[in-house]
Amino acid sequence: MATVSHPYVPRDLQLPGYVPLAFSQFDIVVPYVSASVLVVAAIWILSGYFPKLSKVDRVLICWWVFTGFTHIIVEGYFAFVPDFFRRKSPFYLSEVWKEYSKGDSRYVGRNSAIVSVEGFTAAIEGPASLLAVYAIASRKPYSHILQFAISLGQLYGCVIYFATAILDGDNFSTSPYYYWAYYIGANSSWVVIPTLISIRSWKKIAAAFEAENKRKIS
Amino acid sequence: MATVSHPYVPRDLQLPGYVPLAFSQFDIVVPYVSASVLVVAAIWILSGYFPKLSKVDRVLICWWVFTGFTHIIVEGYFAFVPDFFRRKSPFYLSEVWKEYSKGDSRYVGRNSAIVSVEGFTAAIEGPASLLAVYAIASRKPYSHILQFAISLGQLYGCVIYFATAILDGDNFSTSPYYYWAYYIGANSSWVVIPTLISIRSWKKIAAAFEAENKRKIS
């Protein structure tokens, strides 16, 4: 067997040129959570100055800013910097993905399904999420269909993400802790929240046509 | 090198128990095209008896019937019969997939991204396509959002399908003929038509909200 110099599972995964993690889990998770909380808090306060926005709209704006920046910055870095795990000098975003790969080594292994899903998410869904912020704030008529489209894309990404893992043996996690904390835990928001938004948008859109139909009849 | 007893590329693809194709290309393609034309023609004629349906609605109904049955029967067989290429007695649907695999050997090789996309398409988008037929025919208020959702799912499937092939080296086709006829040709309808339907549904939905907004102002 080849010598293995990385912490990932499966143990026979080949990662030529892999540079070990330099940051601790604390140094990786705390800045991400803090930056997210700060951004969301700032957006929540700012959105309060728009008198026409309901509380639900403001919560949605916070979500779309958070998910948009996560898609563009964090996932964009992963998708479009293929050699992130070989970088000599530690860089925050490459450390994020080396740490996350303890929950799913297909990231550091650059599995093609993962790169496809993440590339599409970063390049299309990320900018579309920021467009959704503008659409909600300025009450555009395409606001619901745009939110529905992005949410469905996020859900489809999750289906491919989890289904390919199961089909390929579901053995990409260093330990049950990382399996539940990273692979399941970190992704769960992108299952639950897009589901809720999809249902809401679907109902709003169906209601708009229902109202239109009634008007035509009366 | 191991002995290779299959016609697929890459030549080192291992397919233990592979049973060679028994049907000719003609015997595979002609029944599929004939059955599709027959079904579409029957649905076109039948839908003419619904006086309230526009020609566009009737064309859409034909599409949803065709794509729904293709998803459920043809793709459903592939997704949920993993050993189709080992079946001793020739069966039409297993012959279809052994033939199509000349354009993309990831099918016979049961690549996990392909199985995930096809499984979701067969189990969710197939039945949803038939629901779209009912929704259009009975003018349900969710008709446009449902058609939009399925079309987006089909497009997302195509993105993953083509992106994973490119990332994995784009070397799964027996010859340029099969590459263009099967891999590109047979899939192109599921890029073009869902794109057109998505754009149409998006516009219809945005227009419904535009009308609602105007009514509230006036």
Image (tube, coloured by chain):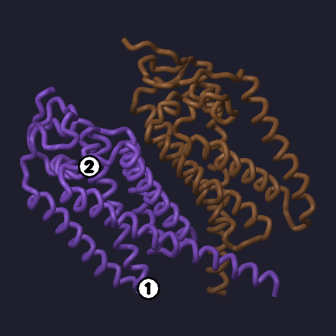
Chain colours: A purple, B brown
Task: Tell whether A179 sits left or right of A193.
Answer: left
> In this view of the protein, which residue sits in the foreground, B192 or B41?
B41
Residue bearing mark 1:
A54
Q: Position of residue B171 (x, y in %)?
A: 46, 23
Residue at image location 62% in from the left, 19% down from the top: B177
Pointer 1 local density, CA inside 10 Å: few below 14, some 14–19, many at least 20: few
Looking at the rendered structure, the kind of residue marked 1 is Ser
Quarter of the figure with the C terminus of chain B: bottom right
Quarter of the figure with the N terminus of chain B: top left
Above or below, B40 relative to A83 = below
Give the mark count: 2
> In this view of the protein, which residue sits in the foreground, A113 or B51?
A113
Residue bearing mark 2:
A104
Subunit bearing disc 2: A
Name the mark on residue B101.
Answer: none
Looking at the rendered structure, the kind of residue marked 2 is Asp
In the picture, residue B11 is in which quadrant? Answer: top left
In the picture, residue A111 is in which quadrant? Answer: top left
Residue at image location 67% in from the left, 46% down from the top: B73
Question: Do badges 2 and 1 share one subunit?
Answer: yes
